[in-house]
Image (spheres, rainbow, N blue to C red):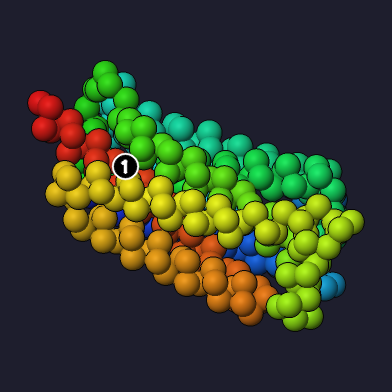
Amino acid sequence: MKSIINSKTAFARFNLLNLSYTLLVILWGAFVRASGSGAGCGDHWPLCNGEVIPTPEKLQTLIEFAHRATSGISLILVVLGFLWALKLAEKHSMVRRVAFITVMAIILEALLGAALVLLKLVEFDQSLARVISISLHLVNTLFLLASVTTLTYISRELKYFGPMKDRFIPRSKLFWSAAIVFAVLGVTGAITALGDTLFPSATLMSGMAQDFKPGAHFLVRLRAIHPFLAMLWIGVVFTWSRDLETLDLKGIRALLLGLVITQFLVGFLNWALMAPNTLQLLHLLVADLVFISLWISGLKYETRESCIQA
């Protein structure tokens, strides 16, 4: 056991496992919203219907409680990763810094989730406050993914366990343009998914007519923005991919563009088939994988450019 704790290889594998588990928790959270189970534990938090371990009287309670349990495990894993980083890495190392940032991200994620429950911004709530809350939740989820991805990436290199003055983050303006557009696209995607859940359409044509109907609820009208932003995102990410090619980062470029194309196709099917839950979850999974590959492309670009300048 002691040899595992002192193993940097085991630490790197742990971070990869934690990243994979984080994706599962995110997907289950989306399923909570899609299944209308956000109020499954009532307005209690962290207890569920006033109990530590509730006796589920309905499926929604079981779904919501499972999400809270898996989220709690995610928090424990991130904290364990931070403590492990303190054991393996030196003071002022990049590994310690990123591990600490990851803890901050998961705590903020838990607080935002708690706010949704305590403010009753769940289930059938159609307020602007809910839109703002899920938008903040989505942005912080990307922040969490970025921090866990960075920790996974740098834990494979011994140099990041030693003291470093410079912060290891992507500095390309074009990369950040792609990341910001993706975040805005993700926010509109979350709003679109909420609108599809609260205002389902019987047919594709009726749904399109509903989007542009005068007097329609703002959640319905906002659904039309997402496809246009998706086109902008594709243009920006393809431009960014050219920079990757100039530094001979063909592997991550191919992965990123392949996932972007897959994301577009799944998104089109999701729209054409009127957003069934399975396709919504698949669309979210591919979107998260796109973001992870985008973030890794930024890290690889920074590493390669630093080596060239050196």
* Residue nearest the observer in this picture, 21 or 141: 141
Counting every numbered tag in the picture gives: 1
Residue at which label 1 appears: 298
Q: Residue at x 28, y 21 (%)?
A: 166
Question: Image check: 11 left or right of 182?
Answer: left
- Up the image or down, 120 lies above or below 29; here it is above
Q: Tell me if residue 60 can be seen.
A: no
* Pick the front one: 31 or 252: 252
Residue 127: give x, y in percent of width and height.
84, 48
Looking at the image, is 24 positioned above or below residue 88? Answer: below
Q: Quadrant of the C terminus?
A: top left
Q: Please say if 166 is above or below 111.
A: above
Residue 158 at x, y = what percent?
18, 37
Q: Position of residue 50 (x, y in %)?
A: 84, 53
Q: Is residue 273 something that shows in the picture?
A: yes
Residue situated in front as seen by the camera: 169 or 309: 309
- In the figure, 40 relative to 310: above or below? below
Residue lying at 29% horizontally and 61% vertically, measured from the top left: 255
